[in-house]
Image (tube, grey):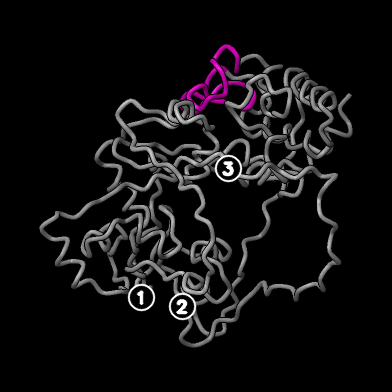
Amino acid sequence: MAIRLGAPAAVIGTLAAVIAATPSNAAEPVRTQQAPSGVLPTVTPRAADAAHLSSARPTTYVVRPGDTVSAIAIRNGLRPADVLAWNGLGWRSIIQPGQPLRLTAPASPSAAAAPSAPAAPSARTHTVARGDTVYAIARRYGTTVAAIMSANGLGRSAMIMPGQKLTIPTASAPAPVPASSAAPVASPKPAAPAAPRTHVVAKGDTLFGIARTYGTSVAVLLQANGLGTGSIIYPGQTLNLTPPAPAQRTATLDAGQRAHALRIIAIGRELGVSDRGIAIALATAMVESTMRNLDHGDRDSLGLFQQRPSQGWGTPTQIMDVERSIRVFYGGAHDPNGSASNGLLDIAGWQGKSFSAAAQAVQISAFPERYGLWEQQAMQWVAGLR
């Protein structure tokens, strides 16, 4: 889970390649694991060009074959990060020829009508210096690694770079409301009509237009229909709007895995965690380490839950202590890691989150959907392991 400083100069080029507009005759885009998820590099035009670019810049741009978001942004004197944000895109998004992009920030619809209110405490910012880590920054400002990552949209594999500005969240957020004092539950609303699962292509349809109509993305449509970026759709063709649900995973535990699973269940019971919460812990351990206490992993990840010393989960020796690592994953009032990390019981409203979302709130993984693939098996382990 570490976030390290420094990135080679080629990172920006690598990221640009990931989001390049692909001509219709191009091969399937190659994705690289070196591209950091969640870090948006700052590209600043020369001061001499800034005034001219600002006055001459169009408000929208229609993507042409071979375009990339980085190239479009720099050509118009903008930061790629801003163009991505204004268009609801991420670094892994793919832009298509003919797709319109905003080159100005969208106006806030409620800004003019909103009544004046007392100013909230402004969030602090920190400019990353060489040698900084998110863990060290969190300690300096009296916050947590998880809070900084959440405030800045950073993922588990994200890197921070010298000169990057990080938002440091304030400590004025209200405490979670205990379940016993929660407001009464309102009467359920009538069920909404089921969302359509397919679309019949009409003359003039494009994948981008269909994606916008149904609030999805071109990448999802490509995946759901087994299409490549150069595929052609035809009038009368039926397209699936969502990919089929992946199959649930199963496994038979060996003696070592079974011992770890039993310990996860026993500690969960001791802490008063629900069966579902214990199943989330089991699934997370299965995804992260195949339920083994590994002395290696991605970057400095270690142990049953692949916790990272550089992100404040403890020293390597502490993380390799199975008992301690399980208690740190659960968190709560008796967390041996204190406030340096957020365990499952520290996540407000985790009980109402989906299985994958609850695990992801703790792990901050680059592949959050993997946890849900073990939900059924993990629940069987909770019920059957003795």
Sequence order check: which comes first, mark 3 or mark 2?
3
Q: Amino acid at mark 1?
A: Gly
Q: Earlier in the sequence, mark 2 or mark 1?
A: 1
Please name the residue shown 53% across and 24% down the image.
312
Q: Residues within 10 Å of mark 2 (few under 14, many from 20)?
A: some
Q: Residues within 10 Å of mark 3 (few under 14, many from 20)?
A: few
Is label 3 in contact with label 2 (beta carbons under 8 Å)? no
Mark nearer the N terminus (1 vs 3) = 1
Side of 90 relative to 289 (left or right)? left
User: Helix, strand or loop at disc 1?
Assistant: loop
Q: Nearer the viewer, mark 3 or mark 2?
A: 3
Q: Which residue is mark 1?
A: 98
**Quadrant (top left/top right/bottom left/bottom right) for the C terminus:** top right
Q: Nearer the viewer, residue 19 or 146?
A: 146
Mark 1 or mark 3: which is in front? 3
Task: Give the class, few, some or many, for how many residues have Cα within 10 Å of label 1's Cα (few <14, many ≥20).
Answer: some
Q: Is residue 312 one of those drawn in magenta? A: yes
**Drawn side of residue 154 relative to residue 35, left or right:** right
For mark 2, what is the residue? Answer: 206
Task: Give x and y (percent) for residue 349.
Answer: 72, 46
- The residue under label 3 is which amino acid type? Ser
Element carrying mark 3:
loop
Q: Who's the residue at 86% across and 66% down the image? A: 187
Front-most of residues 220 and 362: 362
Residue at 46% across, 48% down = 122
Which region of the structure is painted magenta?
295-319
- Tag 2: residue type? Thr
- Image x and y of residue 323, in percent: 71, 16
Residue, disc 3: 172
- Which residue is farthest top? 317
Q: How far apart in space, not on screen, are marks 1 and 3 (Cα)?
A: 45 Å
